[in-house]
Image (cartoon, rainbow, N blue to C red):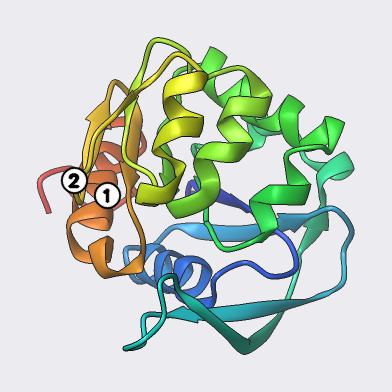
Amino acid sequence: MAAPKVLIVTGDAAESLEVIYPYQRLREEGYDVQIAAPSKKKLHFVVHDFEPGFDTYTEKAGYRWDADLAFTDVNPGDYAALIIPGGRAPEYIRNDADCKRIIQAFFKQEKPVAQICHAALVLVTAGVLKGRKTAAYPALEPDVRAAGAEFVNSEAVIDGAMVSARAWPDHPAWMREFIRLLKAKAPVSGRSAAA
């Protein structure tokens, strides 16, 4: 039996750690993970870091990584769960009609969704954040509140089938909770849901 598939939606200038960590962590658990972007191409990720003397994060060039498919080619029904990394990619993928279609489908079907950092911007534009509680990069608190959602400054916030976090330092708690939820809803064949 084929492993359940998990979709990551992202694009250029996504935070390297927020794409690669869940990608590798879920593959380690036995899931088939695919990356979708506005087009099927080699993506350019970035590294956001926190340095003394800066009032905000800094950005450096990160890894390059292949997108497996374009948003337009995604059938959400083929996937058990969705991950939306942060970085700057959410600023522009949120305007893609197919990206919005994908996100709305996962929320409508109540499939597990993990979103982190600036990913909340995509959920706002897709119209799925209103009435929910979510973590996000703290500078997005006004955006989250303006969308009618409750901002929670915590490392892993669970709201139904959605698990959110502030940024890559929250990865251990964020992925632990998301994997727990994912295993309950879509276990990998041959592995117990409690594993």
133 to the left or right of 48: left
User: Quick check: 177 above or below 23?
Assistant: above
State the residue in front, 164 or 189. 164
Q: Quadrant of residue 157?
A: top left
Q: Is residue 2 visible?
A: no
Q: CA distance from mark 2 to mark 1?
A: 18 Å
User: Quick check: 22 above or below 162?
Assistant: below
The residue carrying mark 2 is 154
Residue at 78% across / 40% down in the picture? 74
Query: Badge 1: how crowded within 10 Å, few (<14), some, or many (20+)?
Result: many
Residue at 33% across / 52% down in the picture? 166
Q: Is residue 144 visible?
A: yes
Query: Badge 2: how crowded within 10 Å, few (<14), some, or many (20+)?
Result: some
The residue carrying mark 1 is 179
State the residue in front, 116 or 20. 116
55 to the left or right of 150: right
171 to the left or right of 23: left
Mark 1 element type: helix
Viewport quadrant of the C terminus: bottom left
Residue at 35% across / 67% down in the picture? 168
Q: Position of residue 39 (x, y in %)?
A: 89, 58
Q: Position of residue 17 (x, y in %)?
A: 45, 75
Mark 2 element type: loop
Give, as a three-letter code, the residue at label 2. Answer: Ser
